[in-house]
Image (cartoon, rainbow, N blue to C red):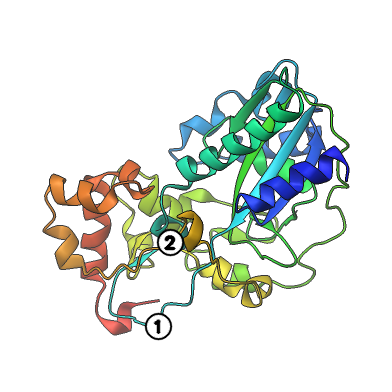
């Protein structure tokens, strides 16, 4: 078995569902130009951090000067469909332990495996918040293609995927990138988007309910509030509509500590939270970063839209 296959087998044994390898060469300048245009049009909203270190984002060697390869791993987080309609909705990934910590821990174990092969190997672990264009890296590593929902999509696992990378000085044989797979004529995600944030050629975060309920710091525009419905944190309409996700498997990783909580919340319950109660609920969750003030803002909108005829 080759070194590359050994690394992949180790990654799978740690709980990842997909793993691919690519070089640490700069990412195609076309993707950088598209990202710059997206920023110039203001589509990032209040996410100013996306405009920082743009050159670094498309140049893996800035993360690690001696970089030769990038190992990209993905974990499936799809949960069983929730049938109860009387509670607030929370994005599936937020029901799991904080994926930043979970994936970093697993990648650290994979990095230890690299060091067992070569004790002098250098590496840098990246998970979401690092300045690296991880979807472009994942596509080049053969993990999947970027669908019209602007998410990495895999033929087997769909787009309920969380990504993490190890940028390393270890020179590895790269996998073939995903080039030909795409969504074809399907527009189900675009049609399902409650606010029109998705279109055939792009995505405007300023209209996206996930952005509005998680990242947007100020008051949400009235015309967009009316689209939020019972969504307390995030929105998954584009994922639920995707045909790839209809047949993708449910995440079954209880044995390694990656299990979604069964949460049943009402707007009144959230609006009554103290800071201590919120911290207890959001402990080891990505929800914690959004903060109680914004979560209560969202709950108030959900309460005002609770009449059935007003829900999307």
Residue that carries the numbered disc 1 in the rendered image: 83
The CA distance from mark 1 to mark 2 is 14 Å
Which residue: 34% across, 54% down? 221
Mark carried by residue 41: none
Residue that carries the numbered disc 2 in the rendered image: 91
Dot 1 crowding, Cα within 10 Å, few <14, some 14–19, many 20+: few
Q: Nearer the viewer, residue 2 or 181?
A: 2
Is residue 131 left or right of 115 when viewed as pictured?
left
Instruction: Using the rendered view, name the quadrant where residue 166 is placed.
Output: top right
Which residue: 56% across, 42% down? 106
Is residue 72 left or right of 301 when viewed as pictured?
right
One can see residue 36 in this view: no
One can see residue 149 in this view: yes
Is residue 30 left or right of 198 when viewed as pictured?
right
Dot 2 crowding, Cα within 10 Å, few <14, some 14–19, many 20+: some
The location of residue 270, given as percent across then percent down, is 19, 60
The location of residue 247, given as percent across then percent down, is 66, 77
Q: Nearer the viewer, residue 130 or 29?
A: 130
Secondary structure beneath label 2: loop
Earlier sequence position, callout 1 versus callout 2 = 1
Instruction: Using the rendered view, name the quadrant where residue 27 is placed.
Output: top right
Which residue: 72% across, 17% down? 120
């Amino acid at each position: 078995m080759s070194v590359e296959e050994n690394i992949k087998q180790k990654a799978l044994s740690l709980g990842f569902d997909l793993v691919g390898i690519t070089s640490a060469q700069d990412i195609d300048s076309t993707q950088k130009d598209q990202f710059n245009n997206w920023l110039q049009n203001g589509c990032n909203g209040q996410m100013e951090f996306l405009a920082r270190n743009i050159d670094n984002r498309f140049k893996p060697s800035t993360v690690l000067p001696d970089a030769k390869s990038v190992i990209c791993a993905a974990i499936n987080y799809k949960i069983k469909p929730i049938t109860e309609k009387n509670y607030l909705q929370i994005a599936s990934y937020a029901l799991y332990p904080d994926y930043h910590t979970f994936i970093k821990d697993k990648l650290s174990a994979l990095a230890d495996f690299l060091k067992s092969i070569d004790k002098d190997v250098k590496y840098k672990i990246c998970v979401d918040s690092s300045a690296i264009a991880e979807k472009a890296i994942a596509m080049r590593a053969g993990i999947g293609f970027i669908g019209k929902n602007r998410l990495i999509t895999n033929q087997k696992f769909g787009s309920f995927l969380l990504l993490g990378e190890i940028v390393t000085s270890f020179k590895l044989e790269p996998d073939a990138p995903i080039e030909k797979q795409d969504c074809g004529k399907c527009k189900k995600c675009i049609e399902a988007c409650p606010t029109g944030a998705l279109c055939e050629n792009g995505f405007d975060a300023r209209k996206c309910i996930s952005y509005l309920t998680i990242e947007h710091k100020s008051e949400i525009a009235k015309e967009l509030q009316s689209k939020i419905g019972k969504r307390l944190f995030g929105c998954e309409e584009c994922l639920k509509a995707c045909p790839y996700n209809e047949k993708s498997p449910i995440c079954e990783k209880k044995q390694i500590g990656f299990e979604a909580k069964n949460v049943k919340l009402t707007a009144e319950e959230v609006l009554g939270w103290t800071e201590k109660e919120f911290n207890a609920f959001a402990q080891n969750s990505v929800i914690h970063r959004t903060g109680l003030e914004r979560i209560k803002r969202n709950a108030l909108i959900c309460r005002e839209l609770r009449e059935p005829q007003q829900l999307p």
